[in-house]
Amino acid sequence: MPRLPGVSQQEAVRVFQKLGYRVVRESGHLIMSNRERRLVIPRHDPINAITMGAICSEHQPRNPPWFSAASSPQG
């Protein structure tokens, strides 16, 4: 099975900044926040594709608030 390409840490930070996150703290990992959610971005270069997928799922949870409202019966 071929390896999935990674994402550079700078590119990941740039994308999340465009989505409204800002860097709150830096040490071994970057902590980014948008006042609702907190993301932890490792200082690996490149960031593994599976790790990046987990970070993205923290940004966009599997059950967004509108999902439960859309699936509830109306009446």
Image (tube, rainbow, N blue to C red):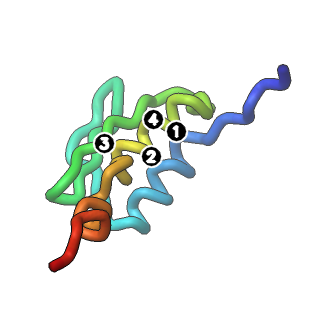
Amino acid carrying label 3: it is Leu
Label 1, secondary structure: give it. Answer: helix
Marks 2 and 4 sit apart, C-alpha to C-alpha, by: 5 Å
Judging depth in this view, the residue of 49 and 28 nearest the camera is 49
Label 4, secondary structure: give it. Answer: helix
Comparing labels 3 and 1, the label whose residue is closer to the camera: 1
Is the Cβ of the residue at disc 2 closer than 8 Å to that at disc 1?
yes
Q: Name the spot of residue 16 as percent of width and height, x first.
A: 42, 57
Residue under the point 56% across and 51% down? 11
Q: Name the spot of residue 22 as percent of width and height, x first.
A: 28, 57
Judging depth in this view, the residue of 10 and 38 nearest the camera is 38
Which residue is labeled 1 in the image? 53
User: Residue 39, which numbered label?
Assistant: 3
Callout 3 crowding tier (Cα within 10 Å): few <14, some 14–19, many ≥20: many
Marks 3 and 1 sit apart, C-alpha to C-alpha, by: 12 Å
Which residue is labeled 4 in the image? 54
Amino acid carrying label 1: it is Gly
Which residue is labeled 2 in the image? 56
User: Residue 67, which numbered label?
Assistant: none
Comparing labels 3 and 4, the label whose residue is closer to the camera: 4
- 2 w.r.t. 36: above or below: above
Is the Cβ of the residue at disc 2 closer than 8 Å to that at disc 4?
yes
- 62 w.r.t. 6: above or below: below
